[in-house]
Structures are given as structure tokens and as C-alpha cells.
């Protein structure tokens, strides 16, 4: 179970780092994939903020796992699950589809919570 817990945590941290990088490098495409396309002439600063937030979560998660261990990472995962839960609500409130809201964001929150549970069990 230890290998699974660590592997899932690393994959999730790297995935959110990738998502953050995508928002920084291809903000409009990333916004469309998020479930709420960006306004063509809108303020791209908000997309950059999202990218920075996600990239920071990814780096922080990897640092916690490497430096502080499974228990610290478990607490991090438990708290960070709030982001995809919030993303679920944001997509629903701003015209995104239920498929994206639940199939991507809510499902991500569930996987992050599973990761937290596995890490707590280590």
C-alpha cells in the first residue's frame, strides 16, 4: 500500500503541476479544457493566476512528500481537495457542462481524497 500511496500522490502532484504549466503557456486552450472557455478579449491575468496556483500546488505537494513525508502530504491532499470541489461549482455556475464538472473536477476531488486516505494509512 505504501508504494501505491506514494505513486498516486506523485502522479497527482505532477498532474496539477502540468495543468498549471498549461495555463501559463496556453491559457485559452487550458481554460476550454477546464470547462469554462475564456472570453476572447478577456483579461488573461486570471488565467495566469490559475496557472500559478496550480503549479504552486504541484511543487508544494512534491516538496512535502520529499521533505516531510506521507502524513504531511496526506493533510495537504485533504486540504487541496477543496480546489477541485470549488472548480466543480465554478464550472456549473458559469455555464459549463455537468459532464465536465463532475467527470473531471468532482472526480479529481474524489481521487485526491483517496490519495489522502492512502497516505494517512501508510
Image (cartoon, rainbow, N blue to C red):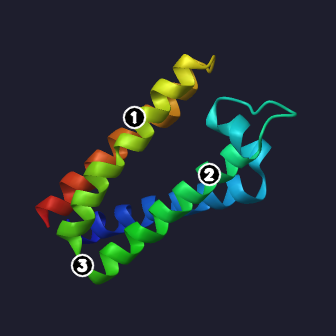
Q: CA distance from mark 2 to mark 3?
A: 27 Å
Q: CA distance from mark 1 to mark 2?
A: 18 Å
Position of residue 70 relative to residue 68, above or below, is above
Q: Earlier in the sequence, mark 1 or mark 3?
A: 3
Q: Would you say 98 lies left or right of 96 here? A: left
In this rendering, the label closer to the viewer, 1 or 2: 2
- Return the x and y of residue 88 as percentages of the image width and height: 47, 29
Q: Residue at x 66, y 29 (%)?
A: 36
Residue 34: tell me if it is visible: yes
Q: Would you say 103 lies left or right of 42 here? A: left
Q: Residue at x 62, y 21 (%)?
A: 96
- In this figure, which residue is indicated by the disc labeled 2? 49
Q: Nearer the viewer, residue 44 or 118?
A: 44
Q: Which quarter of the figure is the C terminus placed in?
A: bottom left
Q: Which quarter of the figure is the N terminus placed in?
A: bottom left
- In this figure, which residue is indicated by the disc labeled 1? 85
Helix, strand or loop at mark 3: loop
Position of residue 95 relative to residue 28, above or below, is above
Q: Earlier in the sequence, mark 2 or mark 3?
A: 2
- Return the x and y of residue 105 as percentages of the image width and height: 48, 35
- Return the x and y of residue 19 as percentages of the image width and height: 60, 54
Q: How dense is the environment of label 2, judged by Cα within 10 Å: few (below 14), some, or many (20 and up)?
A: some
The image quarter containing residue 34 is: top right
Helix, strand or loop at mark 1: helix
Q: CA distance from mark 1 to mark 3?
A: 26 Å
Helix, strand or loop at mark 2: helix
Q: How dense is the environment of label 3, judged by Cα within 10 Å: few (below 14), some, or many (20 and up)?
A: few
The image quarter containing residue 44 is: top right
- In this figure, which residue is indicated by the disc labeled 3? 68
Q: Earlier in the sequence, mark 1 or mark 2?
A: 2
- The answer to whether the residue labelled 1 contacts the one labelled 3, judged by CB atoms less than 8 Å apart, is no
- Return the x and y of residue 27 as percentages of the image width and height: 75, 48
Amino acid at each position: 500500500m505504501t508504494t501505491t500511496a506514494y505513486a498516486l500522490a506523485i502522479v497527482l502532484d505532477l498532474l496539477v503541476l502540468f495543468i498549471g504549466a498549461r495555463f501559463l503557456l496556453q491559457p485559452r486552450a487550458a481554460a476550454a479544457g477546464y470547462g469554462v472557455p475564456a472570453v476572447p478579449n478577456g483579461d488573461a491575468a486570471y488565467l495566469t493566476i490559475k496557472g500559478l496556483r496550480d503549479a504552486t500546488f504541484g511543487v508544494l505537494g512534491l516538496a512535502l512528500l520529499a521533505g516531510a513525508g506521507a502524513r504531511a502530504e496526506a493533510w495537504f491532499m485533504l486540504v487541496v481537495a477543496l480546489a477541485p470541489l470549488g472548480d466543480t461549482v465554478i464550472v456549473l455556475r458559469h455555464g459549463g457542462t455537468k459532464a465536465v464538472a463532475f467527470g473531471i473536477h468532482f472526480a479529481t476531488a474524489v481521487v485526491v481524497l483517496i490519495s489522502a486516505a492512502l497516505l494517512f494509512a501508510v
